[in-house]
Image (cartoon, grey):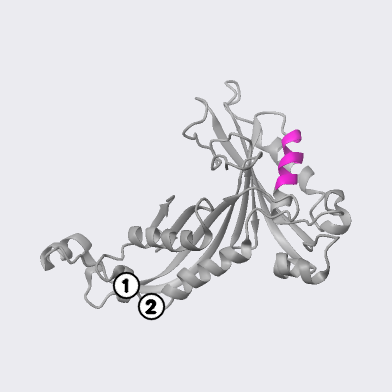
Amino acid sequence: MSRTEPGAPAGTLYITKRAEVATSHHCAVPEWDARQNEAVYGLEARPHGHNFLVEATVAGPPDPRTGMVANIKDVKAALLATLAAYDHHDLNADHPAFRAQAPTAERIAGHVFADLSERISTGHLERVRLTEGDDTVYETFRPGSPLGPGRLDDERDPPMLITRRYRFSASHRLHAPGLSEAENAKTFGDCNNPSGHGHDYRLDVTVRGAIDPATGLAANHQAVEEAVRGEVVGRYHYRHLNDLPEFAQGVPTSENIVRTVWQLLEKRLGEGVLYRVRLAETRDNAFEYFG
């Protein structure tokens, strides 16, 4: 994959290589007792395992002789060399960086970035994306990267992005009170069906934050989970959206839904935590809002 990015130097392209590792770990601060660790890390405080999908994005201008930013074979070799310390290892026991601190996914992404950046000889490492399971993604960036979310006021390092994926099933009808029946039918087509229709919605919620030096976390994962489940999934799952107060006088288009989701979550999580809300109503249509 390669592309140019707004805000990058002219001629910059990005290439991405990925690989998967199988690891085990548990997140615990050695000085804390089991109760305190479980209160902070939840189930992550217990010994368990993950398949991490690691994506490395390298940036630079293409070489005029080869047409490549970097030889993808070299990027692959560097990535596999970095991940050798993780694949089929218990991180608490086997990785020296985690013998005295909790191996959170945030820290893993940071250590992978630091190690891999020294192995990239052509171009420079721009981003590392770490996917845990199927529904959580951690992203860390080169300082000042145009791919990143910008700085937070109270941090020294670039913020990390954490995306969690949710699903809910709901029905709705697109019908604007201010339009005539004919205008509604023309504007919304089949979506104006008086009986309504529905979707299996996929919701991606992205928050940003700096890694806490004590816990190794860049977000309050429990707070995010409770906010999304309580304010959005619990509110919309198996509901007809037109029956809800926020859409009683408006149109529950995906554009309006994604903005409403942002407002609901921002009230619970506080200003500056949310980075992006993305709503896919089908495999073909997706809508994003950045507040």
Residue, far top: 64
Identify the mark at residue 245; answer none if there is no mark: 1
Query: On the rendered structure, is 264 left or right of 118?
Result: left
Answer yes or no: is residue 283 visible. no
Quadrant containing the N terminus in the rendered view: top right
Query: On the rendered structure, is 19 left or right of 283?
Result: right
Regarding mark 1 in the picture, which secondary structure is present there? helix
Which quadrant of the view contains residue 93?
A: bottom right
Q: Position of residue 151 (x, y in %)?
A: 57, 40
Which quadrant of the view contains residue 114?
A: top right
The amino acid sitting under disc 2 is Arg
Q: Is residue 118 magenta?
A: yes
Q: Nearer the viewer, residue 5 or 34?
A: 34
Crowd around label 1: few <14 · some 14–19 · many ≥20 (10 Å): few
User: Residue at left 72%, top 33%?
Assistant: 120
The amino acid sitting under disc 1 is Pro
Q: On the image, numbered disc 2 is attached to which residue?
A: 239
- Main SS category, magenta section: helix
Span of residues in magenta: 110-119
User: Residue at left 52%, top 30%?
Assistant: 8
Of marks 2 and 1, which one's residue comes earlier in the chain? 2
Query: Compared with residue 255, is residue 44 higher up or lower down, i.e. above or below?
Result: below
Which quadrant of the view contains residue 33?
A: bottom right
User: Residue at left 31%, top 76%?
Assistant: 243
Crowd around label 2: few <14 · some 14–19 · many ≥20 (10 Å): some
Report if the CB atoms under discs 2 and 1 are less than 8 Å apart.
no
Query: On the rendered structure, is 101 left or right of 17?
Result: right
Q: Nearer the viewer, residue 227 or 57?
A: 227
User: Residue at left 49%, top 35%?
Assistant: 5
